[in-house]
Image (cartoon, rainbow, N blue to C red):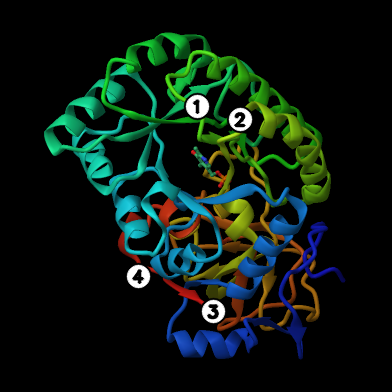
């Protein structure tokens, strides 16, 4: 039996004596060491491996930034501080996390709609680059800079006039709350020339969770073309060109991993003319889930095994409140199963199908809906893969007042 049912995703964790091994430790021993379930575990080794793949596939002068919001666990961010080239934050809270690392200020950028005056002041005082998303932010930053006696570093976040096709999440093109519409950028740049702001360049982010190399390649080409057009009105040479990211990971049955080598080769073919047109620029790709998503698992324990009119329900001590995305309630239109196994019986005798549900009093609390799983009993460990991004901090952990999961880096 394929322990993942209809899933075709290759397990990134080895199996020893029918037990999943995480960072060299069998899962039940790891659970004992942590002292509780549920927990999230993130593998340093797998994160490093993924960064290695990115470094070898992408052109050498592409700077790799990590988008903190995908997983802001402080230990993980500290680990990444010496392995990526920059961080992208989306709040003052995330800014605090990255300022606790050794990452230089000018390698940190701050994007997100609705930045408050206080956040802008913190960013200006910290000396990081603010990706401004409106005329209001630009004017406020100039005023703040004058009052602090600093020249705030800024880039313009552009809402492009194209979208990243076949993305799990479109974040550019059309009408958006993100960034400044590309056709409004020249006027914004004209307004900037009278202000005491240190212009760095542009961030053009068009979408997220994309598994199609061709779509990403097309978006990168269009991004560079748009940047060329916008640079004509810039008050200073472009020193920073953030090309966005959008690299996706497979979550559901039938999904295939992104062809990273193809994306990298295409980007390499675009770089000679890009370097020529932007001789002073640092080129950035910013990624969240692609760096950490596949390196993490969520683990909970079976509390009860019930049969309701013929269907097996494994009731676990974790669920939607810890892992909203795996329950299907974080932007999915039609619920599909994440890859799930019984971690201490990966290839055990199979149930026909079983559903893994959480302890919440809502039918939405499902971690696996009628999946092929090994025959599990009370005390067994349920493992949800692809859980390193948008898990712990993207879940309503107070809902129903159950205990919190722990997070570890191993
Ligand atoms: C959310 C976000 C990211 C990270 O997206 P992933 O899908 O996790 O790679 C990167 N950049 C911006 C601007 C974002 O809002």
* Tag of residue 278: 2
Give the class, few, some or many, for how many residues have Cα within 10 Å of label 4's Cα (few <14, many ≥20): some
Whether residue 37 is visible here, answered yes or no, is: yes
Identify the residue position indicated by label 1 in the image.
237
Between the residue at mark 4 and the residue at mark 3, the CA separation in whole angstroms equals 22 Å
Cα distance, mark 2 to mark 1? 8 Å
Asked whether the viewer can see residue 255, the reply is: no
Q: Are marks 2 and 4 in contact (CB under 8 Å)?
A: no
Element type at mark 1 = loop
Residue at image point 67% right, 46% down = 248
- Residue 91 in the image: state x and y as whole percent: 33, 44
Mark 4, residue position: 403
Q: Nearer the viewer, residue 33 or 197?
A: 197
Which of discs 3 and 1 lies nearer the camera? The answer is 1
In the depicted view, which residue is nearer to us: 218 or 326? 218
Residue that label 3 marks: 410
Residue 404 at x, y = what percent? 36, 68
Is mark 3 in CB contact (under 8 Å) with mark 2? no
Nearer-N-terminus badge (1/4): 1
Q: Earlier in the sequence, mark 2 or mark 4?
A: 2
Q: Nearer the viewer, residue 54 or 214?
A: 54
């Amino acid at each position: 039996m394929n322990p993942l049912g209809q899933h075709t995703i290759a397990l990134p964790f080895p199996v020893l004596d029918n037990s999943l091994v995480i960072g060299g430790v069998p899962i039940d021993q790891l659970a004992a060491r942590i002292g509780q379930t549920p927990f999230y575990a993130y593998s340093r080794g797998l994160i490093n491996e993924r960064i290695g793949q990115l470094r070898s596939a992408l052109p050498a002068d592409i700077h790799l930034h990590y988008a903190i919001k995908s997983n802001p666990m402080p230990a993980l961010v500290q680990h990444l501080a010496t392995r990526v080239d920059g961080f992208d934050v989306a709040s003052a809270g995330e800014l605090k996390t990255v300022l606790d690392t050794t990452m230089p200020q000018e390698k940190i950028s701050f994007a997100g709609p609705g930045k408050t005056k206080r956040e802008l002041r913190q960013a200006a005082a910290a000396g990081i680059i603010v990706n401004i998303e409106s005329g209001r932010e630009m004017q406020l930053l100039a005023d703040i800079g004058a009052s602090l006696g600093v020249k705030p570093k800024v880039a313009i976040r552009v809402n492009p006039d194209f979208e990243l096709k076949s993305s799990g999440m479109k974040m550019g093109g059309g009408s958006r709350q993100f960034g400044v519409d590309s056709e409004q950028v020249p006027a914004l740049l004209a307004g900037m020339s009278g202000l005491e702001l240190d212009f760095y360049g542009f961030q053009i982010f068009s979408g997220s969770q994309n598994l199609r190399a061709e779509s990403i390649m097309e978006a990168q080409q269009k991004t560079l073309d748009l940047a060329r057009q916008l640079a004509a009105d810039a008050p200073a040479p472009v020193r920073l060109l953030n090309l966005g990211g959008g690299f996706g990971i497979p979550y559901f049955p039938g999904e295939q991993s992104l062809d990273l080598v193809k994306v990298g080769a295409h980007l390499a073919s675009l770089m000679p003319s890009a370097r020529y047109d932007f001789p002073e620029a640092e080129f950035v790709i910013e990624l969240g889930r692609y760096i950490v998503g596949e390196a993490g698992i969520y683990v909970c324990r079976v509390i009860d095994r019930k049969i309701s009119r013929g269907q097996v329900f494994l009731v676990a001590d974790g669920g939607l409140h810890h892992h909203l995305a795996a329950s299907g309630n974080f932007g999915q239109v039609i619920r599909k199963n994440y890859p799930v196994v019984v971690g201490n019986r990966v290839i055990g005798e199979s149930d026909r199908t079983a559903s893994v549900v959480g302890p919440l009093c809502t039918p939405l609390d499902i971690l696996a809906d009628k999946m092929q799983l090994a025959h599990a009993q009370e005390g067994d460990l349920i493992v949800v893969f692809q859980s390193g991004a948008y898990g712990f901090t993207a879940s309503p952990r107070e809902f129903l007042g159950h205990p919190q999961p722990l997070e570890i880096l191993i």
